[in-house]
Each structure stands twice: as C-alpha cells, then as structure tokens.
Image (cartoon, grey):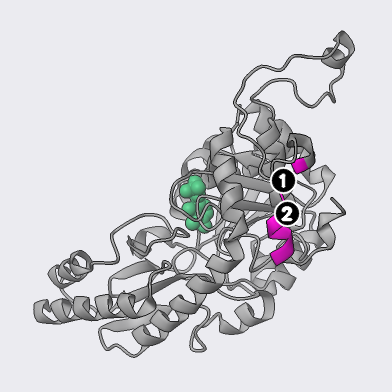
Amino acid sequence: MADKKKYKDDTKLMHVGIDPDSYHGLMNPPISRGSTYKYPSLAAYEDPDHKYRYGRYTSPMAEHFGEALALLEGGYKALPTPSGMSAITVAFLSFLNAGDHVLVSDALYPPARDFCDRTLPRMGVEVTYFDPLIDEAGLKALLKENTKVIHFEVAGSATYEIPDFDMLVKVAKAHDIVTICDNSWASGILFKPLEHGFDVSVLSCTKYIGGHADIMLGAIIARDEALYRPMKTTHKDLGICVAPEDMALALRGVRTLNLRMKATARSALTVAQWLEGREEVARVFYPGLEADANYATMKQYFKGCNGILSIELVPVNKEAVRVFVEGLDLFPIGSSWGGFESLLQPQHMNETRTAVPWTGEGFVMRLQIGLEDPDDLIADLEQGFAIFNAAR
Ligand SMILES: *Cc1c(COP(=O)(O)O)cnc(C)c1O
C-alpha cells in the first residue's frame, strides 16, 4: 500500500496494522502463535538485525500492532506491552539511572504513583510531584541538575487537568529532559503528543483502543530512533512480550476507535450538562464543559473529548453514597474505562494528591459513559439521586 502516513485519521484507522498481500489477500493478519523461528541460514542466525529470532522478541502480530500504533501516534516505532502500566514502567526504566530526579504530574494514575513511590526510590531515583496546571516559573523552580524525565497524563486521572503543553515542551527541550506522556485519555485520536514535540507516548490500549473490556494491553511509542533504542533494549531485558490474540483484538478495536470516541463524547457531554444542573452534585469534572477549568486548553490542543467524567457529590453521610452507588442499574462499580459499557469508580482523592492537596469534602466518583442511550443513563442517575435524597 502507498504511504499510509499521508491519510487522514479515519482512513488511516482502516489500513494500519494490515498487510493482505503477505497473507494470500486475507484482510486481517492471522493469529500466529509461536516461540520458535527456523533461521534460513547460519548467516541469518549470526546477523543481529535478523528480525524473527525468538517469539519473545517479536512476532508478525507485534509488527502489525506496532505499525498501527506508530502511525496513529505519528511516531517512529511502537513497542507492545502486556498492560498500560508496563508501558509506563518500561519507559521510565529506559531513561532513568540511580541518582536521577524525575518530575511527575500530581494527577497521576494511582498505580503509576505507587511505582513512583515504591519502586523508583529503591532504584535510587528521586521523585517530585508537580501541579499539572503549573506555569513556567513554577516548573523551572522544581528542576534540578539531575532532572532527567518529566511524566504526565495528557489529561490528569480523575480530574482531567490539561497541562500547558507548549510550555512543557519548551522547558524540557531547553534542559535536555525526556518527556513521557501518558496519552491513554486521548488514545492516539484526540491528541498526538509526539507531533507536538514530546518524546515518548505511552498508552493503555486496555481502554479505548481495545474498547471492549476484554483485553489488557499497552504500547510505547517513540518520536525517533534515538528514543526508541533504549526502550527496545529495556523491553527486551525485562522479558516483555504480548500474546497475538490480544493484539489482534486491539487491531479490531482500532477500526471503530474514532466512531466510538465521538459517540461516547457526545453522550458524556449530555450527561455532564445534566449533572451540572443537579443540586446533589457539588462539581462536575469534564473538559468539554464550558465551566470546566480545562475547557480552554482542551479547545486549544485536543480534537475533542472522550467519555469519562467525574463528579463530586455534595457532602452527605456515607450511607447515602452507598445507596446511590449500589442503586444504579447501568453503572456497575468497575475499575476501568474506554469499554462499551458505562461504569462507576469511587476515587480516593485525599490519598492520591500531594503537590495540590485535595480540598473537596464530598465523595468523588468517575463515570465512564458507555455506548448506551444517554437518555437511559440520565434516567438511571435520576432514580439513583431519588434514593440518595431519601437517605441523606
Ligand atoms: C488504566 C490506566 C493505565 C494503566 O493501564 P492498564 O492497561 O490497566 O495497565 C495507565 N494510565 C492511565 C491514565 C490509565 O487510566
């Protein structure tokens, strides 16, 4: 096929990660399982650049998946990882040495925060959390001689803060700092960090890319070859590899990524606007709302929003929270997002913020808006609030 890079996203999404001519015309690459490759010759065995050496290092499906993610994110190459979490840890471990310092956004995915608090210090790496809405002077004040990495999510976990990307790129480049962006929120569609000048994009493909709540998968995408090489080495040294079935499911998800994202964003905005008008809700966090603190940066940098929002309830007794959460029919408690189904996840904000201590008094929960009819979702929340009000 001609250079796939030239196409618009909707076209690209239909053609990345496939190569029918290599498979008798079969549109999707077949799932080929295997550990062992037969080398064609001794010379091939002795050639370090011979591609198919052993199942752990790569596989035809890993090549297709990597091509798809690299094209989607506008990067040089992509590495598959068994989860979004391992994409983050491999990226970190590729650029950090004992004695280094790393700046990490305070609005971090909590398990990534655990890695920064528990594992990085054991490796002799010092971590400082920063306010994702920090300005240039504030960021510069946190820099140290040994700051080697800045890590942030393109929209913060649970509260969706969107940093000043132009400023972050400028400061990082001026100080030779590697930037690692968690782009799961935008999932290669709403924002392209590498095209914006950032160095490494990490993705939880478990979320929108898989899109169907049936896989765990991640990816690391490098802006150029110099950034790719150390990550490829760490990936290999840590024995990271992914089964072909999961990558095949992710490639299936890619085809409908933009359609699902648009539909879920439309519903999420409808639900968010409805929630804004409820007296049971103290605050709604959704960058698509004009009243949200991140609305202007969302408009500036992103093509649109996704389907996750959070609410802080007015302060009430725990029993009212419990009957609300357990009384919803279409929002089961679940820890993920990006799938087809709506979900609710309670957030423990006090335990997950230090640079910007949490001051809210009400119970916070994230709502993942699925592909259900938003009228049904709103009706369900409305009956939930009736139970809530009776119990307060
Ligand atoms: C879920 C999530 C991850 C981790 O992805 P897994 O595939 O669950 O390991 C990383 N970053 C963000 C922002 C997430 O929401």
User: As drawn, which residue projects farthest toward the top?
Assistant: 42
Q: Are marks 1 and 2 in contact (CB under 8 Å)?
A: yes
In the image, what residue occupies the spot 51% across and 62% down?
106
Vertical order, 216 against 267 (above or below): above
- Residue visible at 79% across and 40% down in the picture: 21
Image coordinates of residue 298 in percent, x first then y, are 61, 78
Quadrant including the C terminus:
bottom left
Residue identifier under label 2:
15
Amino acid residing under circle 1: Ile
Could you say where residue 66 lies in the image, as x and y percent from the top left? 70, 43
Question: For the stretch drawn in magenta, what is the main secondary structure?
Answer: helix
Highlighted range, magenta: 10-20
Q: Please tell me how crowded label 2 is: few (under 14), some (14-19), or many (20+) other residues with Cα within 10 Å.
A: some
Q: Helix or strand or loop: what does disc 1 sit on?
A: loop
Mark 1, Cα crowd under 10 Å, few <14 / some 14-19 / many 20+, is: many
Q: Is residue 209 left or right of residue 72?
A: left
- Mark 1 to mark 2 CA distance (whole Å): 6 Å
Could you say where residue 178 lies in the image, as x and y percent from the top left?
A: 73, 52
Name the element at disc 2: helix
| Residue type pointed to by label 2 | His
Q: Specify whether 349 is left or right of 178.
A: left
**Residue 384 image position (x, y, % from top left):** 20, 75
What number of labels is visible?
2
Q: Is residue 94 above or below residue 107?
A: above
Q: Which residue is mark 1?
A: 18
**Residue 131 occupies quadrant:** bottom right
Q: In the image shown, does 251 or 99 lie closer to the viewer?
A: 251
Residue 66 seen in the figure: yes
Q: Is residue 13 magenta?
A: yes
